[in-house]
Amino acid sequence: MTGVGAAGGRSPADLVTAARAGSMRAAGRLLTLIEGPRRDEVLRLLEPGEIRVVGFTGPPGAGKSTTIAAVVSTCRAQGLRVAVLAVDPSSPYSGGALLGDRIRMAAHIDDPQVLIRSMATRGHLGGLSAAVPAAIRLLAALSYDLVVIESVGVGQSEIEIAAVADPTVVILTPGAGDAVQAAKAGLLEVADILVVNKADRDGAEQTVRELRAESDVPILTAVAANGTGIPELVAAVDAHHRADTAQRRAARARAQILSLAYSRLRVHPGLGALADAVGAGECDPYTAVGHLLRPVGVGDRPSTGVAE
């Protein structure tokens, strides 16, 4: 493959050229750059492009990674180039991402048409890395056909996946009250497709019945470990994609913008001083919000009074 040897020392423009020529190392280096302060530099080099994005979420142990690996195999049989972004919780000590998803998808490691990347959430509210939208744009520019996102799978925060993916596939397992817990966690509210994985276990039919009482989206059964139900899942994903509308795309974009805006506001340099002022009763939170949203360079240091 082109550009494998020295991707790390190249400029972003050279990396884009090499990645478009097939260098997986250059693509990986670009993904590293967009997770850091050079994100905008890379994005300026890319023309907007269209790409399909499918999200998978669900409780830990539901078999998300196994299901994704089987879906990737089916998509590769159709000749599609696929990228998998496995978004992991950041370590509170190192900020690093777990690589277990790569291990479970080992069958695709040596396929040059499949890119697998673990991305840390880095404390971003909602379970998805703040770099994911940029990664999607990059992968579109590199002519990938499909991006599969596996999100953290820890509950309420998972609803953010619907801002970047269509459809959102929620993976559950039989028994253990998964259907009820998913409803409580808000997962069913964002599910476009529900899959009861490990459907060869006792309680699968009961779980399907419970889900039908809670949701009107398509409900499928699968045994991802042996491929059962995967062609039907891929067909359901294709059917949902064909039914997408401009209105739904705009709604996803709005949610994505708001999520990223919140991420930036959390690290705003004036947030600490404003919080101290509100806590001390020197400023009300409404005035503080006004200061926080003021464009950079407008006005002087935040006032600690209610009125300006």
Image (cartoon, rainbow, N blue to C red):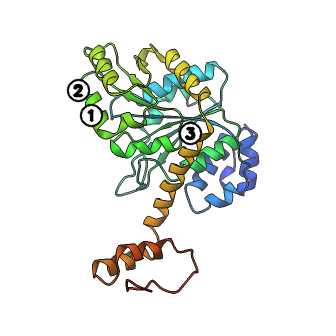
Type of amino acid under label 1: Gln
3 vs 2, front mark: 3
Give the vertical position of 278 relative to 58 (above or below): below
Please tell me the numbered disc located at residue 181.
1
Sequence-wise, the earlier of marks 2 and 1 is 2
Judged from the image, the secondary structure of the residue bearing numbered disc 3 is helix
Q: Pointer 3: residues within 10 angstroms few (<14), some, or many (20+)? A: few
Residue 163 position within the rendered picture, expressed as x and y whole percent measured from the top left: 50, 44
Q: Nearer the viewer, residue 183 or 119?
A: 183
Please tell me the numbered disc located at residue 176.
2
Q: Pointer 2: residues within 10 angstroms few (<14), some, or many (20+)? A: few
Q: Residue furthest left?
A: 176
Q: Which residue is mark 3?
A: 248
Q: Pointer 1: residues within 10 angstroms few (<14), some, or many (20+)? A: some
3 vs 1, front mark: 3
Q: Residue at x 50, y 15 (%)?
A: 232
Left or right: residue 40 versus residue 262 is: right
Q: Are marks 2 and 1 in contact (CB under 8 Å)?
A: yes
Type of amino acid under label 3: Arg
Type of amino acid under label 2: Ala
Left or right: residue 178 versus residue 139 is: left
